[in-house]
Amino acid sequence: MEPFLTVSGTAAPFLAANVDTDVIIPKQFLKEIDRSGLDRGLFFALRFLDSGAPNPEFILNRSAWQGAKFLVVGPNFGCGSSREHAVWGLKQLGIRALIGTSFAGIFYDNCQRNGVLTVQLEEDELRELGLLVGQPESNRISVDLPAQQIHLQDGRAIGFRIDALRKEALVQGLDAIGSTLRRAEQIRAFERRHLQENPWLA
């Protein structure tokens, strides 16, 4: 995975509550045998009109927020089914981090496994951030994961907490397999010791 250190870019507000994975990536985009083209399906019913043309009212289609790297989202984002395609689609569209107050559990884990940072803020902090990034003149932010800070255009910084193991994996660009392989020698040492202590298992 691409390491996450300090990432700067546009943040788009998408503050509806309980946005489920069928809204993020509708079921008709789960039929392919690979991950290609999932960015087309992301928020499909919201991003496109019935004619197939982009919906000019949807935030990610508006000129000031096109190419956004961050979404500032409402509570319980990613609820519903466990489809990992939702995170794959976000990554393909260029979203590096989601900033909210709460995320659905399986979705939260899927983000971690695929290199999408999830930042949890207090409600008042998120409300203020949502108002700021909702204005074109203040919608650029920098997320510094090593320092655990979100830097705003006016010079202020918002701190956030993150589990140390999740942080390490994201900073190093490691998925679950990569994280495990970093401990390969410890695993082999355990296996040798375990077999010495329990020779009948050999």
Image: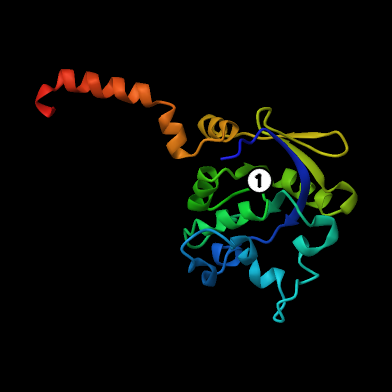
| Residue 160 image offset from top left, x and y in percent | 66, 35
Indicate the amino acid at tag 1. Ala
- The residue furthest bottom is 51
Question: 99 or 117: nearer the eye?
Answer: 117
Give the camera-side residue of 73 and 93. Answer: 93
* Percent x, y of residue 80: 51, 62
Residue found at x 80% / y 56%: 65
Q: Nearer the viewer, residue 62 or 106?
A: 62
Q: Could you tell whether 66 is left or right of 146 in the image?
A: right
Q: Residue at x 57, y 51 (%)?
A: 103
Category of crowding for the residue at label 1, using alpha-carbon neighbours closer than 10 angstroms: few (below 14), some (14–19), many (at least 20): many
- Per the image, the residue denoted by label 1 is 97
Residue 153 sits in quarter: top right
In percent of width and height, residue 46 lies at: 69, 70
Q: Quadrant of the C terminus?
A: top left
Q: How many marks?
A: 1
| Residue drawn at the location 61% of the way across and 42% of the way down | 117
* In the displayed structure image, the side of residue 163 where residue 184 appears, left or right: left
Q: Secondary structure at mark 1?
A: strand
Q: How is the image coloured?
A: rainbow
Q: Which residue lies at the image location 41% right of the left edge and 30% below the top edge?
A: 181
Q: Determine if residue 142 is in view.
A: yes
Quadrant where the N terminus sits is top right
Q: Is residue 18 visible?
A: no
Q: In the figure, residue 189 lies in which quadrant?
A: top left
Residue 168 in the image: state x and y as whole percent. Answer: 55, 30
Horizontal side of 28 relative to 62 (left or right) equals left
In the image, residue 155 above or below residue 52: above
In the displayed image of the protein, which residue is found farthest to the right?
137
